[in-house]
Image (cartoon, grey):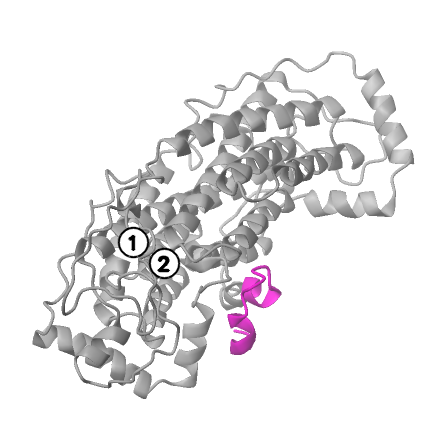
Amino acid sequence: MQDADAMTDLRRSRSPLVLAAIAVALAAGGCGDDGSAAEKSAESSAASWRTWVLRSADQIAVPSPPRDTDAELAELRRVAAARTPAMAREARRWDGQGAIARWMEVNFDYVAERAKDPPAASRAYGLLSVAMYDAAVASWKAKYRYRRDPPRDVDALFEPSAAPSYPSEHAAIAGAASRVLAYLYPERPAARLDAMAEQAARSRVEAGVNFPSDARAGLALGHGVADEVIAYAERDGSTRRWDGKRPRGHGAWEPPPGSLARPVSPAAGTWRTWVMRSGDQFRAPPFPKAGSPAYRAEAQAVLDTKTNLTSEQMRIAKFWAGGQGTALPPGIWNQVVLAYMKRAPLSLPRMARVLALLNVAQADAGVASWDTKYAYWVTRPENAIRDLGLDRHWKPYLDTPFFPAYVSGHATYSGAAGEVLAHLFPKDAELWRTKAREAAESRVYGGIHYPVDGTQGLRMGRKIGDLVVAYARADGAER
């Protein structure tokens, strides 16, 4: 791991220290990817993979490509002759993993700039990832329908893909991602996101690896996918309002001492789920009754942990903190996975699939943990330790969040992520699960969760992860 203090500075969530930390820890294992570069590039089976929101991979009509390519080839040669170093740099930034990673980085920044709301963040990561995945699969379906050869006899920056050229998958992903992000973050300028998508598509033409019509068709396909994902999002219940009612009295949630903050997203446990039947499918059992010996023991355990906190526990607490101004806990898992995949790059459809499976699991984990949180409204350790008279002035190592303690959302996210990643990258399965446990324990080290919050959160998250793994085994990508 890197320097602990630097790791906690997640305000710009693309920090190399953050992105590299766990990828370095996993360096002894493999990324679980086999096959030649050409095989990965072609990835013909992706045309038949199961989609998440689209009814089928060919739901969005893609018109036939132009038969006469002479005019487009002449244009590509003119573009290549006028290619500037800046154009080449931009094309390289969008090539390979950049076609997906750059959109995730935009999402990290947008999450960091909003007030802390973990289930809203995991919902956004899920919708964006599904949109990019469905766009990739839909573009592959059209590629192998039309089987248009990539441009030849052009001064290209990269080797032509082994997959057919039409439509451009980079453009399709960009068209879907830009429109979904504009929907999720209406306070951000949509024109800037559209321009970013246009640049992503244009970069493939400037690189000499796609015809202009490939890029145009890809953007249009991506926009169609985005429309379907946005329609799905409009029906997920995320605009449902809280009625303002909550329990009062000993053991019931109150904002941290000195704060008048309202609870964050009390209705999130009712949102539509991806693989669960509903948010309460794996609801945790009740927390120990306020004032009981078990309740007191949970509070005492948190107090004792801080009293004896080691430097290693401080480092772990800071690394996994995911507080205000960061990509939040579900974003940390995305950052880790993006760094991990750099070591053994996957094809774009497989990379999109990893992120879709990870973020569908985390989106459901957010709903499930919020269901339990607001079923029981358990106060945070900071309030409990003071109210019990264990220490009238006690403060946690990390800042107390503005929502109930039980269960730990981070533990639920991590349990789900750990199981999905253990399946996708089996060579490092135990390390993924170890990191999930570490993330859960980090909240006790930070003084913001009781031990049982983590154990129950991990249990719930693993069950959600199991559902996503079952889906993955049947989505057609593992035949």
Q: Look at the numbered disc 2 and give the secondary structure of its residue.
A: helix
Q: Amino acid at mark 2?
A: Ser
Among the 4 quarters of the image, the one containing residue 477: top left
Q: Position of residue 360 (x, y in %)?
A: 39, 43
Viewer can see residue 30: no
Res 414 label? 2
**Is residue 220 left or right of 428 when viewed as pictured?**
right
Q: Is residue 462 above or below residue 129?
A: below
> Count of labels shown?
2
Asked if residue 2 lies in the magenta stretch, the reply is yes
Q: Look at the numbered disc 1 and give the secondary structure of its residue.
A: helix
Q: Amino acid at mark 1?
A: Gly
Res 272 label? none
Query: Which residue shows up at 45% across the image and 59% down it?
Result: 328
Query: Which residue shows up at 67% across the image and 40% down it?
Result: 196
Question: Bounds of the magenta span?
Answer: 1-20
Q: Position of residue 73 (x, y in %)?
A: 83, 23
Distance between mark 2 and mark 1 Cα atoms: 7 Å
> According to the image, label 1 marks what residue?
461
Q: Is residue 131 above or below residue 445?
A: above
